[in-house]
Image (cartoon, grey):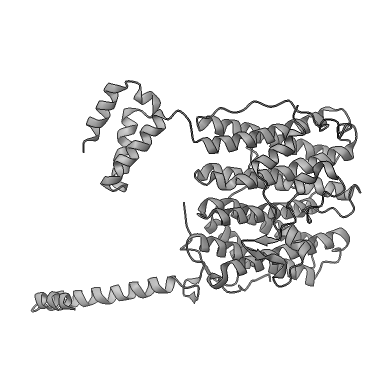
Amino acid sequence: MKVLRKRTTLSYGSPIKRRDFLTYVAASVSIVTVAAACTKNDSSNNGIDLGSGDIGILNYSYALAQLEAAFYTQVINTPYSSLTGDELSFITDIKGHEIAHREFLKAALSTSAIPPLEFDFTSINFANRSNVLNIAKTFGDTAVSAYNGAGQLLTSADYLLIAGKIVSVEARHVAYIRDLISYGSFADSTAVDSNGLDMQQKPTDVLATLDPYIKSKLDPSHLPTL
Amino acid sequence: MNFKNILHEIEKADPEIYDRIDSRRKVMHRFKDLGGKLALTAIPLALGSMLNKAYSQTPPPAIVDILNFALTLEYLESEFYSTALGVPGFISDPAELPAFTLIQQHEADHVNFLTTTITSLGGTPVTSPEFDFTGKGTFPNVFSNYQVFLALAQTFEDTGIRAYKGQVTGLMSNKTVLTAALQIHSVEGRHAAHVRYIRRKTGASTDEKPWINGNDTNGIGKPVESTYAGEDNVVQLGIAVPTLPGVSNGVATEAFDEPLSMDDVNAIISQYIV
């Protein structure tokens, strides 16, 4: 406070400078307030903050698992008429795997976990097999590309290994879904490039693809980048 | 600190320095860029790492070793499928001929990609071993009995997934290589799902799924048990997944694929190497 008093004393007799100083103080306070708000996972004007560092990437994975679990739960609750036999059995499995991923990530994140998200599936006709499978394909390919792109953003070897354990299961899912849509398209050139590599995407691109289906507003701005 | 003088002294000592690293102009340019980003005290460190790059006898050993390990697996898979595709009429299902042609193409692409990557890191790609896909007599009809071929295809794909997964943490120091390895790893996952789905549809294994349940070999049995050992793990990051809401033990095993160590994978594939 001594320093402050000295600064104002020096500015005395110059109202403009004094006002500038007060503006500066006010601005500093508001920056501190914004910074403090950003460290919380609460909703703010920017949306639900996924967080930073490895926790941010885990929350990002948790958001993807929440989306897929909610989608497959709806598919099983309101099945299209031909969802029977092996197809019903396998898609029920996929639903179970996504719930396992969701519940595991929630438990691993503990108090750092984002809240349950709200989704918007109003554009999907769950009675239409082709519509459902094509959405499943988009979600599956996107999840694979998301994990492939996120591995390099993680600093913990344990979390990287977990991401690896999940991504190959996501790849199995989408290969099966693709085979249901068009048999033999499990790894076609829309998924795998001329080097034999699958897709990889950064979080902002993944979230842009999934945005139409996520009602909750997400704030990925503190996620790590390359 | 005068970098031009330092470089001049190095040039006097080693006229070939710029063959070992970048041209002088590029070096100066790099330091100009670095100078803006690094604290002054960090610059000797950057110079040191550049000289290490120039004079080091061995490239980053762990990464090249891992990539050569992966390359051997890809040689195995690529030759396995090309051999099957080379037997006239062997893969007779018109729906599966293009599928195995595609899978073989990916494995050959992986061979090329890994060879190029190893070379670009200054390493030497290993050459292909000689393979014996009968597993030294265990599967004598691998290229005459379609179901035996499918069983081994499944084993190789599932082994490949576990092999890459076991090495990803060893690649963390090179983000580009790590990402590429993950991109190969998920392609192997797609292949495995398709092969497993064929085995389900053709009745080879009535409880087979595109994903792995427990440590089940799906009827292939003892010769491939080591490929599935440990796949029944249900504890992730210390969390017992079946205790979580709505998760059964079987689902918990299927939802996470497990890694294998390099030694375990080498033991598995040694059965198929002469």
Residue at x-position 46% and y-position 63%: A222
Image check: A20 left or right of B121?
A: left
Q: Residue A194: x percent and y percent?
A: 64, 37
Image check: B127 left or right of A225?
A: right
On screen, residue A188 above or below A145: above
Which is nearer the eye, B143 or B239? Answer: B239
From this viewpoint, is residue A125 visible? no
Residue A99, picture quadrant? bottom right
Residue B266, picture quadrant? top right
Q: Residue B226: x percent and y percent?
A: 76, 45
Residue at x-position 84% and y-position 59%: A87
From this viewpoint, which residue is outermost toward the left? Answer: A13
From this viewpoint, is residue B137 visible? yes
Image check: A82 left or right of B157?
A: right
Residue B127, picture quadrant? top right
Q: Residue B51: x percent and y percent?
A: 36, 32
Which is nearer the eye, B108 or B66? Answer: B66
Q: The C terminus of chain B appears in which quarter of the rendering?
A: top right
